[in-house]
Image (spheres, rainbow, N blue to C red):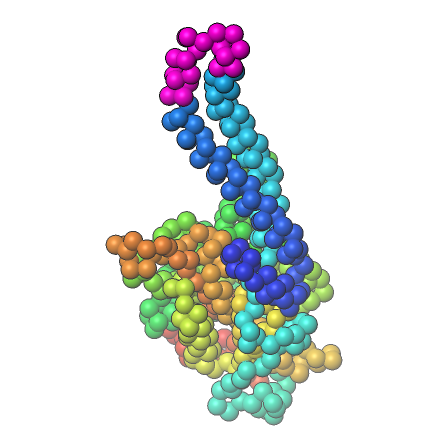
């Protein structure tokens, strides 16, 4: 959620941000409703102050008038009686006016709140402008020794590559037909060494973040209340991507949603809390099952393990102080952790700076990391291509404001005003998608697959599959 005061102070920044992100939201209507709400709230506050004064002053005033009334006659007595009646009626009149303003405020609230939730965080000024993901800008790429993505796989390895779909079928690592039987399209079953490799990657990625970089491991729910999806910025604009569990219809009290990333629950951990400044940054990592409807993705990457409805992901989240330099520093570090992980696995990759139109509502900046997949098809044959495997996001206070997550400068003993935290997130490894470059890069001419050395400890020492 954006800061309404910031929007009032500089509405053009938010108009431009919405246009650059191609998100339609009526900033003028928000300003109109906000001004009306503040006007009504001020009037209501003034009336309540008058109520307080009246409760203290009316009694003595009525007492004085009643004393005068005892000796009054005729018109004077009638006037005093009217004045007393007016004073007695005043509290009820003030209450009626306060209640009327409360009703007007209640009528404005839902529309204003709904509009504000749709306002995207403006992109940072150094994010390149663009119309779509096609305008993303490559930052750099890395290749392991002895492999050059500018050359064909045959030139690098001496034989034509098989796609991961061919590899898993030949080696019995996955069963797509039974996956579809069980869950419908975009489902799969990992079997035998395929399942072991999947778990090995996840365990390695979590250990990598905990043991090398000191992140705190957390096991979190993947079924959450709607407030968590709204608070983390996945609703309202991403509602069509989430699986909805309609518990209210079954007497459950409230509906629930399956999360598409562990980020939701990791961020929701401290919803509504005031954290001690000395406890920041909070660095969390989780392994969780993720669910995505892939709405609007019909016909895209339908074969294999690339675009699926259910997967497991190791996610890193950082909650830090409200300092842009600190946020930027953590963004760089978190990207560096993933580069270190991919290099330890010997997987070629490139970093893409996402343009304004590809940031989504909640990010001030985002860098995608794409891994090289030799078996990706171009013009009917495996030519190799990069495919997204990670996204690193810098969100400043956008999520924390929605979640009401704050800290008080000076620690628990501080007396100053609270400050809204900043947050960042980045994929560490998502499987089975990460299995695509692993299997395709480590395939051998005889059809077997070499297990990367970094994963062998989590594979019981297995060096080769097949």
Indicate the position of residue 117 as horizontal and vertical percent values: 57, 53
Looking at the image, residue 92 lies above or below residue 111: above
Residue drawn at x 59%, y 61% as measured from the top left: 11
Residue bounds of the magenta highlight: 60-80
The one nearer the camera, 220 or 47, is: 47
Where does the image place residue 446, in percent across and percent down from the top left?
A: 57, 83
Q: Is residue 21 visible?
A: no
**Looking at this view, is 164 or 348 the one in front?**
348
Please tell me whether residue 122 is drawn above or below residue 48 in the rendered image.
below
Snapshot quadrant of residue 159: bottom right
Q: Quadrant of residue 136?
A: bottom right
Residue 406: image quadrant is bottom left
Residue 122 colored in magenta in the image: no
Return the x and y of residue 27 as percentages of the image width and height: 63, 56
Q: State the residue at coordinates (70%, 79%).
A: 378
Residue reaching furthest left?
Answer: 413
State whether the magenta stretch is mostly helix, strand or loop.
helix
Q: Does residue 32 appear in the picture of this structure?
A: yes
In magenta stretch: residue 79: yes
Task: Looking at the picture, tell me which residue is in the foreground, 133 or 415.
Answer: 415
Query: Is residue 337 placed above or below 86 in the rendered structure?
Result: below
Does 230 sit left or right of 326 as displayed? Answer: right
> Total number of numbered labels?
0
Q: Position of residue 108 (x, y in %)?
A: 60, 42
The residue depicted at 38 percent of the width and 69 percent of the height is 209
Specify the farthest residue to the right: 379
């Amino acid at each position: 959620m954006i800061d309404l005061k910031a929007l009032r102070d500089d509405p053009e920044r938010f108009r431009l941000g919405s246009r650059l992100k191609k998100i339609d939201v009526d900033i003028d209507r928000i300003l109109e409703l906000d001004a009306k709400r503040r006007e009504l709230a001020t009037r209501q506050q003034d009336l309540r102050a008058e109520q307080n004064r009246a409760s203290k002053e009316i009694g003595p005033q009525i007492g004085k008038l009643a004393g005068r009334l005892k000796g009054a006659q005729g018109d004077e007595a009638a006037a005093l009686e009217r004045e007393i009646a007016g004073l007695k009626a005043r509290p009820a009149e003030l209450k009626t006016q306060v209640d009327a303003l409360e009703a007007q405020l209640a009528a404005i609230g839902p529309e204003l709140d709904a509009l504000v939730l749709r306002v995207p965080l403006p992109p940072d000024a150094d994010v390149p402008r663009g119309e779509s993901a096609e305008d993303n800008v490559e930052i750099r790429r890395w290749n392991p020794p002895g492999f050059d993505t500018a050359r064909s796989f045959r030139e690098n390895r001496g034989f034509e590559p098989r796609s991961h779909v061919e590899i898993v079928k030949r080696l019995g690592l996955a069963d797509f037909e039974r996956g579809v039987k069980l869950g419908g399209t975009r489902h799969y079953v990992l079997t035998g060494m395929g399942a072991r490799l999947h778990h090995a990657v996840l365990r390695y990625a979590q250990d990598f973040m905990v043991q090398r970089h000191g992140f705190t491991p957390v096991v979190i729910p993947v079924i959450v209340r709607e407030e968590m999806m709204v608070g983390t910025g996945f609703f309202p604009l991403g509602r069509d991507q989430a699986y909805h569990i309609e518990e209210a219809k079954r007497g459950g009290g409230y509906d629930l949603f399956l999360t598409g990333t562990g980020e939701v629950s990791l961020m929701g951990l401290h919803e509504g809390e005031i954290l001690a400044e000395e406890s920041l940054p909070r660095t969390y990592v989780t392994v969780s099952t993720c669910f995505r409807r892939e709405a609007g993705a019909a016909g895209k990457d339908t074969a294999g393990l690339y675009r699926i409805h259910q997967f497991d992901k190791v996610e890193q989240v950082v909650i830090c102080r409200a300092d842009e330099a600190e946020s930027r520093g953590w963004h760089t570090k978190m990207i560096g952790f993933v580069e270190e992980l991919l290099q330890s696995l010997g997987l070629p990759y490139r970093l893409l700076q996402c343009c304004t139109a590809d940031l989504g509502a909640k990010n001030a900046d985002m860098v995608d990391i794409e891994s090289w997949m030799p078996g990706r098809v171009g013009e009917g044959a495996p030519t190799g291509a990069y495919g997204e495997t990670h996204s690193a996001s810098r969100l400043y206070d956008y999520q924390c404001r929605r979640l009401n997550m704050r800290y008080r400068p000076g620690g628990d003993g501080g007396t100053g005003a609270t400050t809204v935290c900043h947050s960042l997130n980045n994929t560490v490894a998502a499987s089975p998608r990460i299995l695509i470059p692993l299997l395709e890069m480590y395939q051998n001419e005889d059809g077997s697959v070499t297990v990367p050395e970094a994963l062998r400890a989590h594979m019981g020492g297995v060096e080769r599959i097949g």
